Amino acid sequence: MSDSVLELWLRLLSLHLPEPNDLGEHQATPEIRNRWLLASRGYFTGCVPHDMWFACSTAEGSSAVRCAIESLMESLNLSDVPLDSDTLNLLGIEGGTFTGEIERQVLRDVGFAFLDLIDGKIHGTAASTEVMPGSIPYQRSTA
């Protein structure tokens, strides 16, 4: 997928991760958040490290990631108004600026693809182009 779409997705997703609490829940989220904030900074042209293997390597991490995706998807579903470039440029993503609007459906597609990835419904490598959410409309797997 496009680096800028993945960077935007990871930046927004990091802001939707649940916070650790005194009950010991979500203790993995600070490390996941730090990795995603770095990955979304704009430094990794051509190879943005989403680190899903790390984030979902434990049941706790996988649960936190799913919670963040669901939270972000809920927020994206509140409106169909595109995200404007002036607001997106406030997110601290370097390596370029947003010059146009981003349709919410583009980010929804990425969210569905991430859920399918977690559920083991997407198989491929970084070189695979059959699934490119954010670049071409994403068709959810029914398997």
Image (cartoon, rainbow, N blue to C red):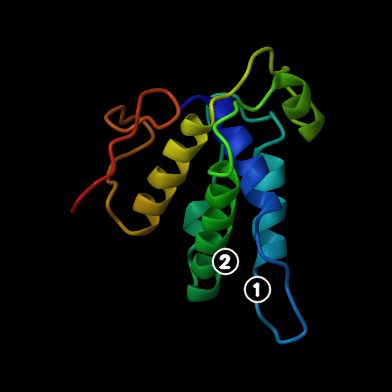
State the image quarter where residue 140 is shown.
Answer: top left
Q: Residue at x 70, y 84 (%)?
A: 24
Which secondary structure lies at badge 2? helix
Residue located beneath label 2 in the image? 64
Where does residue 106 sit, x and y in percent of width and height? 48, 30
Q: Which of the numbered marks, if any, corresponds to residue 48?
A: none
State the CA–CA distance, disc 2 to disc 1.
6 Å
**Which class describes the residues within 10 Å of circle 2: few (<14), some (14-19), or many (20+)?**
many
- The image shows residue 61, relative to residue 107, as above or below, that is below
67 displayed left or right of 36: left
143 displayed left or right of 98: left
Please state, as top left, top right, bottom left or bottom right, where the N terminus lies in the image: top left
For badge 1, the amino acid type reads His
Q: Residue at x 47, y 39 (%)?
A: 108
Where does residue 94 sit, x and y in percent of width and height? 76, 26
Please state, as top left, top right, bottom left or bottom right, where the C terminus lies in the image: bottom left
Taking depth in this image into account, of 36 and 113 the one nearest to the observer is 113
**Furthest residue toward top:** 99
Q: Are marks 2 and 1 in contact (CB under 8 Å)?
A: yes
Q: Residue at x 71, y 20 (%)?
A: 85
Q: Which of the numbered marks, if any, corresponds to residue 26?
A: 1
Where does residue 22 sit, x and y in percent of width and height? 77, 84
| Pointer 2 or 1: first along the chain | 1
For badge 2, the amino acid type reads Ala
